Image (cartoon, rainbow, N blue to C red):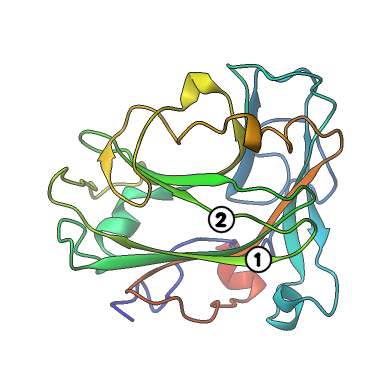
Amino acid sequence: NGTQIGGRRNLIINGDFLIAQRSTSSSTSAGFATVDRFEVNHYGVTASPTQGRVLVASGTTPYTEGHLRAYRITNANQGSVANDAFIRFKTTLEAQDIASSGWNYVSSSSFITLSFWIKSSVAQNFYGRLQTEDGTARNFPFETGSLTADTWTKVVKTIPGSSSPALQFDVNVNAGLILEIAAWYGTDYTGSMSLDTWATYSDRTPDYGAAMDDWYLTNDATFEITGVQLEVGSQATPFEHRSFGEEQT
């Protein structure tokens, strides 16, 4: 399924949330506060949501595939919609890791595949996106599809390279590719755009709109992900479980 990086398939580090050196308990802090390499960002909210690592229930499909932990956002009582507010998961990959991955990112016939498990306590659709950082920033928005409440769903997105608009990844340790999966974005960050295609970065995702405000307006609503994998190739292969030592280093 494409060239590997360092003998590894998964370009995401800690996609099963094995490592949580800061804390495993919930925190209302934004940014890196619990699991390694991933952060929860929130801004403009009435009350701060919490983030934390939780156990995946036995018997569920993620659990039977070896996913024992998940990363969770628990909403607070927001009361009303704020246009400048957002709540999201985020992880950032180094530019050199993408540049050397074997993905021909300037060719539309070369692909990377993103896969992850997601669960929401509120039934609705959500948006996510990839963003390049080098050169002119490019944006690739996608949707999860309508989720059933309290039910794990696997999302798979096959993402082509692009020469127009051109993608760029410099050979350095700086931010190269951002992955965000958003519980909610206010209209200050959204706009009219096509899904599943690269475009010059301006707004982040399509508008959430009234039909997608339910999670944000539900007190104590939860939003969870696990098994996050990004690999070179056009297919989602089984998650690459790595040891604690491999992930920590």
Mark 1 sits on what residue?
153
Q: Callout 2: few (<14), some (14-19), or many (20+) C-alpha neighbours within 10 Å? A: few
User: Residue 70's x, y, as percent?
Assistant: 73, 60
Picture quarter with the C terminus? bottom right
Under circle 1, the secondary element is strand
- Tell me the amino acid under the disc marked 1: Thr
Q: CA distance from mark 1 to mark 2?
A: 9 Å
Q: Quadrant of residue 234?
A: bottom left
**Residue at image coords 60%, 62%:** 248
Which label belongs to residue 121? none
Amino acid type indicated by mark 2: Gly
Left or right, 230 with reference to 133:
right
The residue under label 2 is: 145
Residue 134 placed where, x, y %? 26, 38
Decide: few, some or many residues near mark 1? Use Cα within 10 Å; few <14, some 14-19, many ≥20.
some
Callout 2: SS: loop
